[in-house]
Image: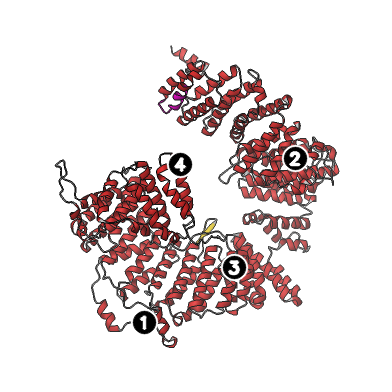
Amino acid sequence: MALSETENECPGGEGGESIVQTCVLGGFGESCETRALLSSLSEVHGSMVTSESATQRFLVIMNRYQEQPHLLDPHLEWMLNMILEFVRSEKSPPSLVHLSFKFLYIICKVRGYKIFMQLFPHEVADVQPVLDLLSRQDPKDSETWETRYMLLLWLSMTCLIPFDLYRLDGHLESDGGKAREPTMDRILAIAKSYLLVCDSPRDAASVLVSKFMTRPDVKQKRLGDFLDWSLTTISQTSDQSVRDIMVLDGALQSLVNTHTHRSHKPAASPTILQCLEQKNLSESSQAMLRKLGVKLIQRLGLTFLKPRLATWRYQRGSRSLAANLSMSQSTTVAATPDVETQKLEEDYDIPEELETVIEHLLVGLKDKETIVRWSAAKGIGRVTGRLPKELADEVVGSVLDCFSFQETDNAWHGGCLALAELGRRGLLLPSRLTDVVPLIVKSLTYDEKRGACSVGSNVRDSACYVCWSFARAYEPEELEPFVTQIASALLITAVFDRNVNCRRAASAAFQENVGRQGTFPHGIDIVTAADYYAVGNINNCYLNISVYIASFPEYTEAMIDHLIAMKINHWDSVIRELSTKALHNLTPKAPNYMATTVLPQMLPMAVGIDLHGRHGAIMACAEITHALAMVFSHNTVDVITFILSTVCGLIEKLSLSKMPFKNETVINYLFVTYSLIFILLHLQVAVVSALSALCEEYYQDEPDVLVSQYIEGLKSPQMLTRCGSALALGSLPRFMIHSKLNQILEGLQQMCTVSQKDGSFTEARRDAVKAIAQVCVKAGVCAHGSPDSALCSENVAGVYGALLNSMNDYTTDSRGDVGAWVREAAMTSLMDVTKLVASIAPEILLVKCMMCCLAQQAAEKIDHYRAHAGNVFLRLLHSTEPAVPHIPHQEELLSIFPVETTTSLNWNAPSQAFQYITQLLGLPQYQYHTLLGLTVSVGGITESTVHFSSQSLFDYLRGIQDNHAALTQFGDALLSIFRDNLRNDRVSIPFLKMLDQILANSCFEIFTTQDNHQFCVDLLALCKECKKTKDISKLRACVTVFCGLIQFQGEVRKKVLSQLLMLLCHSYPVIRKTTASQMYEMLLTYDDVINPEMLDDVMTLLSDTNCDLATVRTHRNQLCDWLGVPRPQVVTKVTRISEAHCHHLYSLC
């Protein structure tokens, strides 16, 4: 549990756009259950199962109050007392004591250690028992760290007794005559030892140090030695190993906590600071060490200054509510002390070390981790609050240097946090606002592109925090000159920021300013429309809220300018599209400004080199033009003519308008050369639509050049070029395909086949599969036509082959099963091609394999793709216009899937889908493929899919138990699948898991009555091949199947036992352990495997398999003798020497 509860959370970070709904509790409703649970600790501690069950239940109860821990306060005392009764009882075994402390830790974690530790008994009589109990703990025991953690917190409270610790020592001579260690030394030794451990008790030890070192007697006698020990520890460790990092963390925490209460020796501060400088923690790779270093340095800095508040600070109002209410609004001014008092209080020397402190804090503001920057910002605020006015102003100037475009986003974020702290504490005087406000306005829109995305959301969020703190820190007249800038910037962020956290932070800051300043224009109306929940939906912000805010003239042009400058060239295409739609909606609010100012700005961007900017500018011109046409309805033709003559990107509209641009250079340059590059902007639909219109109008005379260019693009090493080429080929008009159909299909088919083998270009294969169907649909069907002009009997097999091959694309990468994109596209393309062929030339259809593959996909595990396959299957089955002929078992399929299932059956729901699809197992043509699809579902990992698929499979198997022929046919299909996918882990591992379930449910019981049944013999041979793998999950599944095969009678049982006994000596310890465990359970289940008199000996031997391989082999041989199985013989590997090498050796002799 983290102990840094005083550290505030820093604003920033990415967040989703969902609204989290929380349940507000009214009180601690599980009091009775908790009391019963705590009372039962003495009964459940002895068993791991019962103790774990009780602990988990207690965790569930306590975790409900993570958000409202104060509800536990009235009940903490009796819970603590009940648990401490077990701890204090001498009859309590160690397991009960450890379990009790585990429960105490759960309560402490939820309520917070600072509150909970105050409830511990801390009388004089508690010191020695707690100290003795802690001394008996093993710091290396990872199972009982909660005990040590809570004992250290308890000891921290007992250290607060108001008596000198030497009074507790009495006679230091024990009964044996040996000198007993003083209590003070014992506590200090324990604290030091636990500061160096690697687990959570280290944090509790730092709390102990903070409490222990504040005692006057300890401070006088041991503080100096402790500081020396801490500095020595820091000097002798590095951050290169995990052990040293933990030691360094503990030592730094101890120093930080000893400086919390000014319990240190001020003279030691320069020495500590010098040690930290030599350690150079700011260069450490560990964020926590850098944070502790900054935290310690700021506290050292406070020791060099007088403990006072700066008299020059800006103060708004009074801390007293009564005083504020009694003051007249007309006479309310910021409180400022007289000049004489300021001069007297500021007339003292500042140590030179303070410059080093401030320098380190300023470096911390630029750290790459938020926790370090946040700690440094708070340190800047605390130290500045004790400086004279001139020096404090220099610090503010140094903070403002962070806002340079040469600095990273980390420096901007740290600078915003520091300004917020300074403003909140009244240390940022109004005279500095002229420098600060422009920087904050820039920070509110800070967005720096990095690769394919951008950074800066944390900067914008912290800038909102600055505006929020300013609203509370300054009087309205101080901020009045900057109201327009701040209000416009906050509203722009609240409405147009991409990040939902930033939008909500800006909305909250605007609301705070409206409430406390009262000078923001139309503040109440805007706050009502743009509240916390309204800005959560980005579409609502861009398209609705922005229009409402723009209706107030103070904000209209600022919002439009921001969209033009920052959003229409954004890297995210969604933001660009929303921005252009927002400009369309905002045009009626300022039509003249749009026509005279915005559109001229768009034209250079529309032909610029930045693709994002070009895309956004072209769309913006189109949207603004459309909006202006609606506003100036009497002058629509002039507006459209203006845009069409200047924005050449609107090629689709120009082509459809049949503009006389044939043989113009601009057409060739823009679309032929750059049409593929536009795909980078995820504009496939728009580009493809425009290309089709363009070719239809301008490429009637020279189609071959463009087709050849796109066919060549299918071989490009760039994936996006392949995608663009495939989509372009699919969009070409019929006259361009007419004489090139065979060449186009071969190029698309080759790309699907070649790239699938090496697993690359998945998106390109998906687009190629789509393009195959699109090309076929445009070319048309003619059964006896030419393969270069139409889909015919000569090329239909190649088309179906490519599409069916794509349905077996199971490519995976870091994104998961990306091959599913190709499979989904292949299913859709098959449906389109099949309906096309069925309507014109049904005699050339190839339906059988297609329906089987669709049945396989409809039985697989991913809900979305199963649903797509099922819907395609039913649409083809029930298609009437045209009807699809030659479907295998069509009548049986229609009885299984009546026409109403096309609308009522939810393929996404495993509970509905599998009860239908398993019925296809009874149809010979579909049995293999359906069972193949079911294999990955039954043997999968998704609980609902596994449950319903296996349930439906077992229902089918129970229905054929008395049908020997059907069961034999099912077994043959199983063996075929296993044989075909023996080395395909995607299928073989789920297959073994499914087979284990089938055997465990005795689905082949009819085969077990026959000795050496052929099904078992074949299955055993295939499993022996699987046993050669090095994949642990596959080996484990293989072991369970071997144990299931033991139910078969005859010599095959001996062979199964032989395989299991060989696995007992597998080179992998985990396989040896798994095999022993499974065999143990197998022998308990099947009592006819071994003589009952030997059962106990066998079980004892199987229970002891965690030995070295030689010992295990001896045990295995003993088991072989008891089970009547021949002992396995070690096969000596013989190195084969080639004949040529033998001749060479002979010649040497």
Task: Give the residue at mark 4.
Answer: 50
- For label 2, the residue is 799
Q: Is label 4 in a helix, a strand or a loop?
A: helix
- Name the N-terminal-most of marks 3 and 1: 1
Quarter assignment of residue 860: top right
Q: Amino acid at mark 1?
A: Ala
* Amino acid type assigned to the residue bearing label 4 in the image: Thr
Q: Which residues are magenta?
A: 1098-1108
Instruction: Find residue 476 and report its horizontal and vertical position in percent.
Output: 46, 81
Of the image marks 2 and 3, the number of the one nearer the N terminus: 3
- The residue beneath circle 3 is 534
The disc at residue 409 is none
| Up/down of 44 relative to 337, above or below | above
Label 4 environment density (alpha carbons within 10 Å; few <14, some 14–19, many ≥20): some
Q: Quick check: 428 left or right of 232?
A: right
- Assess whether residue 1105 is covered by the magenta stretch: yes
Q: Is residue 381 left or right of residue 229?
A: right
Type of amino acid under label 3: Ala
Instruction: Indicate which label's residue lies in the foreground, 1 or 4.
Output: 4
Instruction: Say which quarter of the image contains residue 525.
Output: bottom right
Label 1 and label 4: CA atoms lie apart by 65 Å
